[in-house]
Amino acid sequence: MEARYILLPTRGFTASEPYSAPATLRFLASLTPTGQTEHPPYLLVLDSIRENGAKLISLPVDAVGAFRREHPGTRIVPEVFYQPARAPRPAVRIAAARKAKGPTGGVVLAVELQPDATPLEAVDVIAFTDFVQGRGAQGRTNRRGQVRLRLPNGTHSIQRLYLFPHAKAWPRVIRNYRIGVTPIGLRAIDPAFADTRAACYARAGEADGSGVTVGVIDTGCGPHPWLRIAGGMNTVFGENESDWSDIDGHGTHVAGLIAGSGPIFRGLAPGVRLRAYRVFGTRDDGASNFAIAKAIDRAVADECDVLNLSLGGGPLDVLTDEAIKDARSRGVLCVIAAGNDGGPVAWPGRHTLAMAVSALGVRGRWPRCAPGRRGAAPVRTPVRRRSVLCCTLLQSRSRDRPCGTGPGHRLDLAPGHTRGDGRHLDGLPGRRWRTCIPPGKTARYPRASTRYGTIRRNRAPCPYK
């Protein structure tokens, strides 16, 4: 059985003395996609990053051990794949109906764009008849805005219905949807909508970012009238290198946030020089670590200053590690997504030489009908230090006193934390404590010793604001 691997020198991204032996240098330089060497005969070279750099090869699985014995100075690592960093979507775990009875079986839903009632194509529709068990069906709308879901005949209600459009409209979630003949309307995206980014940052000027080149390593970019792409490359093996247009929409979305320049909408730095590097192929198997490494190497050669990689989630990988280190050694910073699953920072975002970027949300800056993080959960307001709540410290050895906290129901006490009148709150050396206190309720906090104090959140406005 054949499998694809990547060959690397003894150390680093490219073979160079004194880190690699002369035999390793000669061996890697001899491996080219157009000309095969006699040794070993079972190895097929598919692609290469520079003459003395990483090689994408095809090799029988049972020949890996023999290859390592013959070439001890050459590292061989598996090809792994990464996915775009997008918000997680609910997944159907159990099919509601095994098979539709004939071409007219199942349930047909129609989706249209509001307010002009235009049929909406390429909307991912996920329907649950039992959300807790994950029982349901999913599909994508056609050019007429219709999708046929494999639900049991006679289904009249959908417990939870998710709609994720490819473009033009906001996503939507509907609970306890009654199936009928009326099309489902999705609200058109308004470029003037004040989202979280607009709430946290001032509107950028047209020249902001001038003199900086940013490479977007993603699903491709554009074509889009609000994006000016200076050039790019498709690094997916077997595809046209000059076709770096977007195959998914994710890369265009990322590029627009960075450097979009329209009559109403602007990115954070419209003046940057933007380059696109597509690492996701037309097949739905993710981005290869080889394609990512090749894109990083090409972007550095194209004199990019910053590289944006909104992808990740795979295992720790030697090839991407070497590519990021090589880019940083040449003065190029990789800005990588931290991940969207709510867990630890994903690889390669947690690389020590990369900058991991997470996200935040401001309440009220996302349409109410649209699903938020993890389905339909609300987006919480980020903490602002100047906001305070008023709480009263009870049952303490010290006299009763109020303390400053962040907004909402979160109480945040730290060493040296000051109350509203500038005096310090005692009893919490060297540690931080947080809790959520509803209005009028009490909670206990750990003191310096093993004893606890009790804090009550007041209903009245705080006099120390």
Image (cartoon, rainbow, N blue to C red):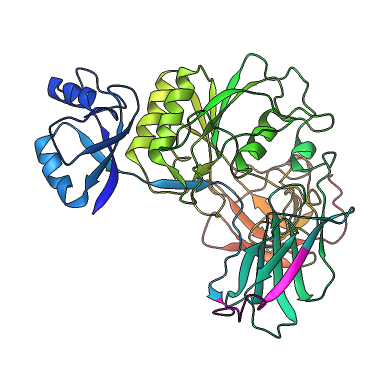
Q: Quadrant of residue 419?
A: top right
Residue at horizontal 66 percent and vertical 77 percent from the top: 106
Give the answer, above or below, for where 257 lies relative to 429: above
- Give 421 or 248, whichever is nearer the viewer: 248
Q: Is residue 97 left or right of residue 14?
A: right
- Give 416 or 149, whichever is nearer the viewer: 149
Main SS category, magenta section: loop
Q: Is residue 329 left or right of residue 193?
A: left
Q: Residue furthest front?
A: 103
Residue 84: percent from the left, percent from the top?
A: 54, 46
Q: Residue furthest top?
A: 211
Does residue 343 show up? yes
- Give 139 or 13, whichever is nearer the viewer: 139
Q: Quadrant of residue 131?
A: bottom right
The region drawn magenta spans 95-110
Residue at horizontal 49 percent and vertical 51 percent from the top: 284
Residue at horizontal 61 percent and vertical 79 percent from the top: 102
Residue 137: percent from the left, percent from the top?
A: 61, 72
- Give 118 or 370, whichever is nearer the viewer: 118
Q: Does 102 appear in magenta?
A: yes
Residue at horizontal 61 percent and vertical 34 percent from the top: 221
Looking at the rendering, in which quadrant would you find the N terminus?
Answer: bottom left
Looking at the rendering, in which quadrant would you find the C terminus?
Answer: top right
Q: Does 288 appear in magenta?
A: no
